[in-house]
Image (spheres, grey):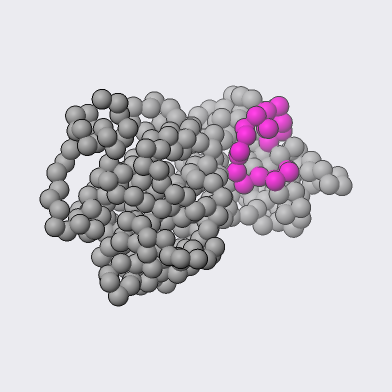
Amino acid sequence: MSDITTDVVIIGAGPCGLFQVFELGLLGISAHLVDSLPIAGGQCAELYPEKPIYDIPALPVCGAQELVDRLMKQIEPFKPTFHLGEEVVEFARRDDGRFRVGTTAGKVFNTGAVVIAAGVGSFQPRRIGIEGADVFEGRGIHYKVKNSSHFHGKRLVIFGGGDSALDWVLELQPKAHSVTLVHRRPDFRAAPASVAKMKEMVGSGSMKHFEGLPHAISSEGDVLNGVHIKLKGGETHELEADHVLVFFGLSPKLGPIAQWGLELEKKALKVDTEKFQTSLPGVFAVGDINTYPGKKKLILSGFHEAALAAFAIQHHLFPQKKQFLQYTTTSPIMHQRLGVPD
């Protein structure tokens, strides 16, 4: 297989990686995307496609999968090439200053720049960690919600104290037969408004909340019918359930990226705030995988980072070329690249 020559390789096809394609495309720069997941969209598509997002400019509310779909539509004019279900396992600077990037599928890229938009890296949901739980995974025990209607009218036990757990409590409580939230401590990591709403529903009797830990599975044959929890005082309590939803967060792993010699801080890639370039010139990082003073892990922050990184990448690839800021509203070149009719 001969090397694939491209301007840029983007590692990660989540929202920030997809928007990076758009910002590069406006500047006439082509890109290939590599992602270990079998679909584009990152965590938004894989873990919570129906989760509502409220802080995307001009979209009062947008489902996570809807956001991915909109981004995919937005980058269509630039015809990016996706390499999904592949992980980058080889990375080296070439003698000519470009980069050699290799994947688990045996593909090798000859690229002028690399953008790492890998979110929290290669991730897996943290499991519930009780005996026999793996037997029911995907049937009675779930670590993501692909189709929320699957849980309508059902008895649900939800574990977790972060935004994902509370978001699904609030989303599913009006539609489920019953909802019980279990969290190991009284403090929550979720948005205060979500916690307040949950406590209000507990106070009204429309749902239950326990402070405890998962202890054992309750089942009849191959059918899950509940879960035992261990309460703060040490006693156990059985909760009836058709489905158990577990949101203990992700176990992030940088994987091979950690071995590339890039400067790290708390398992994140250090970047500057002018170019969003890592410690290695020509390698950039946007989204949750980077860190800098004042960093906020928000999708819209990642979009801003991608915009500035695109101009820095243009200068890296074409240092003699003068840069002009052109507006998509009025620029004929931008219209041509976007396929806007005259």
Residue at image position (16%, 41%) is 325
Residue at image position (25%, 65%) is 281
Q: Is residue 7 above or below residue 172?
A: below
Q: Is residue 10 above or below residue 77?
A: below
Q: Is residue 296 above or below residue 181?
A: below
The x and y percentages for residue 294 are: 27, 51
Count of numbered circles in the view: 0
For residue 22, side relative to residue 120 (left or right): left
The x and y percentages for residue 161 are: 53, 44
Front residue of this view, candidates 50 and 246: 50
Front residue of this view, candidates 258 and 310: 310
Front residue of this view, candidates 173 and 202: 173
Q: Residue 167: tell me if it is visible.
A: no
The magenta segment: 138-156
For residue 155, side relative to residue 276 (left or right): right
Q: Residue 143: tell me if it is visible.
A: yes
Q: Residue 238's quadrant in the figure?
A: top right
Residue at image position (44%, 38%) is 72
Any magenta on residue 140? yes
Any magenta on residue 275? no
Residue at image position (61%, 24%) is 174
The x and y percentages for residue 145 are: 60, 39
Q: Residue furthest bottom?
A: 95
Where does the C terminus fall, quadrant-wise? top left
